[in-house]
Amino acid sequence: MGLTTGALLILLGEMWKAKYRKYALTLSGGGIALFFFSVYAAHQFYGLISQPLGFVLMFSVTLVAVFLAHKDQSLPLAFLGIAGAYLAPILLHSGQSQQVALFLYLTLVNIGIFLIYQRLAWLELLFLGLIGTAVDFVLWGLRYSDINNTPVSVAFLLGNALLLLGVSAALVEWQIRKSESGKYADREF
Protein backbone atom coordinates (compact mmCIF):
# COMPACT_ATOMS: atom_id res chain seq x y z
CA MET A 1 0.00 0.00 0.00
CA GLY A 2 2.82 2.39 0.86
CA LEU A 3 4.61 1.84 -2.45
CA THR A 4 1.38 2.28 -4.41
CA THR A 5 0.49 5.47 -2.54
CA GLY A 6 4.04 6.78 -3.00
CA ALA A 7 3.87 6.09 -6.73
CA LEU A 8 0.50 7.85 -6.91
CA LEU A 9 1.90 10.92 -5.13
CA ILE A 10 4.84 11.09 -7.54
CA LEU A 11 2.52 10.63 -10.52
CA LEU A 12 0.24 13.45 -9.29
CA GLY A 13 3.29 15.63 -8.69
CA GLU A 14 4.45 15.05 -12.25
CA MET A 15 0.99 15.75 -13.67
CA TRP A 16 0.49 18.99 -11.75
CA LYS A 17 4.00 20.45 -11.88
CA ALA A 18 3.29 22.80 -14.79
CA LYS A 19 0.38 24.48 -13.03
CA TYR A 20 1.25 24.09 -9.31
CA ARG A 21 5.02 23.65 -9.23
CA LYS A 22 5.60 24.15 -5.49
CA TYR A 23 2.75 21.87 -4.45
CA ALA A 24 3.59 19.30 -7.10
CA LEU A 25 7.18 19.03 -5.86
CA THR A 26 5.83 18.60 -2.33
CA LEU A 27 3.69 15.70 -3.53
CA SER A 28 6.70 14.13 -5.27
CA GLY A 29 8.78 14.55 -2.12
CA GLY A 30 6.03 12.94 -0.07
CA GLY A 31 6.00 10.01 -2.49
CA ILE A 32 9.77 9.61 -2.17
CA ALA A 33 9.56 9.75 1.64
CA LEU A 34 6.76 7.17 1.59
CA PHE A 35 8.88 4.88 -0.59
CA PHE A 36 11.75 5.10 1.93
CA PHE A 37 9.43 4.43 4.87
CA SER A 38 7.73 1.51 3.11
CA VAL A 39 11.04 -0.22 2.42
CA TYR A 40 12.13 0.40 6.02
CA ALA A 41 8.86 -0.97 7.40
CA ALA A 42 8.92 -4.00 5.11
CA HIS A 43 12.37 -4.92 6.44
CA GLN A 44 12.36 -3.85 10.10
CA PHE A 45 8.71 -4.25 11.15
CA TYR A 46 7.42 -7.09 9.02
CA GLY A 47 10.52 -8.97 7.81
CA LEU A 48 9.09 -9.09 4.29
CA ILE A 49 12.37 -8.28 2.57
CA SER A 50 16.00 -9.07 3.28
CA GLN A 51 18.57 -6.44 4.16
CA PRO A 52 20.37 -6.64 0.77
CA LEU A 53 17.07 -6.24 -1.09
CA GLY A 54 16.20 -3.34 1.22
CA PHE A 55 19.45 -1.60 0.29
CA VAL A 56 18.81 -2.15 -3.41
CA LEU A 57 15.31 -0.73 -3.05
CA MET A 58 16.43 2.27 -1.00
CA PHE A 59 19.22 2.97 -3.47
CA SER A 60 16.66 2.74 -6.28
CA VAL A 61 14.44 5.26 -4.47
CA THR A 62 17.48 7.54 -4.17
CA LEU A 63 18.06 7.26 -7.93
CA VAL A 64 14.41 8.11 -8.63
CA ALA A 65 14.62 11.13 -6.32
CA VAL A 66 17.83 12.36 -7.94
CA PHE A 67 16.37 11.81 -11.42
CA LEU A 68 13.26 13.84 -10.51
CA ALA A 69 15.42 16.50 -8.85
CA HIS A 70 17.58 16.83 -11.94
CA LYS A 71 14.60 16.88 -14.30
CA ASP A 72 12.68 19.45 -12.22
CA GLN A 73 15.75 21.39 -11.01
CA SER A 74 14.65 20.80 -7.40
CA LEU A 75 17.34 20.88 -4.72
CA PRO A 76 14.88 19.73 -1.99
CA LEU A 77 14.11 16.52 -3.91
CA ALA A 78 17.82 15.85 -4.37
CA PHE A 79 18.42 16.56 -0.69
CA LEU A 80 15.64 14.15 0.30
CA GLY A 81 16.98 11.40 -1.95
CA ILE A 82 20.59 11.77 -0.78
CA ALA A 83 19.53 12.00 2.88
CA GLY A 84 17.63 8.75 2.36
CA ALA A 85 20.76 7.15 0.95
CA TYR A 86 22.67 8.06 4.12
CA LEU A 87 19.80 6.93 6.34
CA ALA A 88 19.59 3.51 4.65
CA PRO A 89 22.44 1.92 6.69
CA ILE A 90 20.85 3.21 9.89
CA LEU A 91 17.32 2.12 9.00
CA LEU A 92 18.30 -1.28 7.61
CA HIS A 93 20.88 -2.31 10.19
CA SER A 94 21.26 -6.02 10.85
CA GLY A 95 22.85 -5.88 14.26
CA GLN A 96 26.15 -7.10 12.79
CA SER A 97 29.18 -5.18 11.65
CA GLN A 98 29.29 -5.08 7.86
CA GLN A 99 32.23 -2.73 7.75
CA VAL A 100 33.51 -3.24 4.20
CA ALA A 101 30.02 -3.20 2.66
CA LEU A 102 29.11 -0.03 4.59
CA PHE A 103 32.31 1.76 3.63
CA LEU A 104 31.99 0.81 -0.05
CA TYR A 105 28.36 1.93 -0.04
CA LEU A 106 29.21 5.31 1.51
CA THR A 107 32.04 5.81 -0.97
CA LEU A 108 29.67 5.10 -3.89
CA VAL A 109 27.08 7.54 -2.52
CA ASN A 110 29.79 10.20 -2.18
CA ILE A 111 30.93 9.65 -5.77
CA GLY A 112 27.30 9.99 -6.84
CA ILE A 113 27.10 13.34 -5.05
CA PHE A 114 30.15 14.56 -6.95
CA LEU A 115 28.55 13.59 -10.24
CA ILE A 116 25.39 15.46 -9.29
CA TYR A 117 27.41 18.50 -8.20
CA GLN A 118 29.37 18.53 -11.43
CA ARG A 119 26.09 18.69 -13.32
CA LEU A 120 23.98 20.97 -11.12
CA ALA A 121 26.44 22.81 -8.80
CA TRP A 122 24.35 22.32 -5.65
CA LEU A 123 26.95 22.98 -2.96
CA GLU A 124 24.54 21.90 -0.22
CA LEU A 125 24.83 18.30 -1.38
CA LEU A 126 28.59 18.33 -0.77
CA PHE A 127 27.94 19.36 2.84
CA LEU A 128 25.25 16.69 3.15
CA GLY A 129 27.79 14.14 1.90
CA LEU A 130 30.29 15.17 4.56
CA ILE A 131 27.71 15.12 7.35
CA GLY A 132 26.03 11.89 6.18
CA THR A 133 29.33 10.05 5.91
CA ALA A 134 30.45 11.30 9.34
CA VAL A 135 27.17 10.31 11.03
CA ASP A 136 27.13 6.83 9.48
CA PHE A 137 30.79 6.27 10.35
CA VAL A 138 30.43 7.49 13.94
CA LEU A 139 27.33 5.37 14.55
CA TRP A 140 29.10 2.33 13.13
CA GLY A 141 32.26 3.11 15.12
CA LEU A 142 30.46 3.52 18.43
CA ARG A 143 28.98 0.07 18.11
CA TYR A 144 31.49 -2.02 16.19
CA SER A 145 34.94 -0.43 16.17
CA ASP A 146 37.71 -2.50 17.71
CA ILE A 147 41.43 -3.08 17.28
CA ASN A 148 40.88 -5.72 14.57
CA ASN A 149 39.04 -3.44 12.16
CA THR A 150 41.05 -0.29 12.78
CA PRO A 151 43.25 -0.51 9.64
CA VAL A 152 40.22 -0.71 7.34
CA SER A 153 38.51 2.10 9.27
CA VAL A 154 41.55 4.36 9.01
CA ALA A 155 41.91 3.61 5.29
CA PHE A 156 38.24 4.47 4.75
CA LEU A 157 38.51 7.68 6.77
CA LEU A 158 41.62 8.86 4.96
CA GLY A 159 40.30 7.88 1.54
CA ASN A 160 36.93 9.52 2.04
CA ALA A 161 38.43 12.58 3.71
CA LEU A 162 40.61 13.07 0.62
CA LEU A 163 37.63 12.30 -1.60
CA LEU A 164 35.19 14.58 0.20
CA LEU A 165 37.56 17.48 0.81
CA GLY A 166 39.87 17.20 -2.18
CA VAL A 167 37.34 16.44 -4.88
CA SER A 168 34.86 18.90 -3.36
CA ALA A 169 37.45 21.68 -3.44
CA ALA A 170 38.39 20.80 -7.03
CA LEU A 171 34.74 20.74 -8.11
CA VAL A 172 33.97 24.07 -6.46
CA GLU A 173 37.05 25.62 -8.09
CA TRP A 174 36.02 24.15 -11.46
CA GLN A 175 32.49 25.54 -11.03
CA ILE A 176 33.84 29.01 -10.15
CA ARG A 177 36.10 29.04 -13.21
CA LYS A 178 33.27 27.81 -15.40
CA SER A 179 30.92 30.57 -14.19
CA GLU A 180 33.61 33.25 -14.52
CA SER A 181 34.44 32.24 -18.08
CA GLY A 182 30.73 32.38 -18.93
CA LYS A 183 30.51 35.99 -17.73
CA TYR A 184 32.80 37.21 -20.47
CA ALA A 185 31.86 34.83 -23.27
CA ASP A 186 29.34 37.17 -24.87
CA ARG A 187 31.40 40.38 -24.59
CA GLU A 188 33.53 41.82 -27.33
CA PHE A 189 36.92 43.22 -26.38
Image: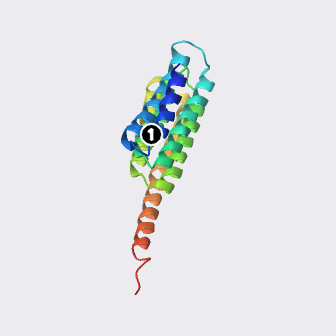
Where is residue 28, by image quadrant?
top left
x and y, in percent, of residue 13 in the image = 46, 37
- Res. 54 in view: yes
- For the residue pair 118 and 66, the one nearer the viewer reads as 66
Q: Quadrant of the C terminus?
A: bottom left
Tell me the SS state at disc 1.
Answer: helix
- For the residue pair 148 and 80, the one nearer the viewer reads as 80
Where is residue 181, by image quadrant?
bottom left
Residue 63 left/right relative to 20: right
Callout 1 environment at 10 Å: few (<14), some (14 to 19), or many (20+)? some
Residue 108 left/right relative to 12: right
x and y, in percent, of residue 8 in the image = 51, 29
x and y, in percent, of residue 178 in the image = 45, 67
How many dots with numbers? Answer: 1
Task: Note whether 118 is above or below 176 in the view shown.
Answer: above
Amino acid type indicated by mark 1: Trp
Residue, disc 1: 16
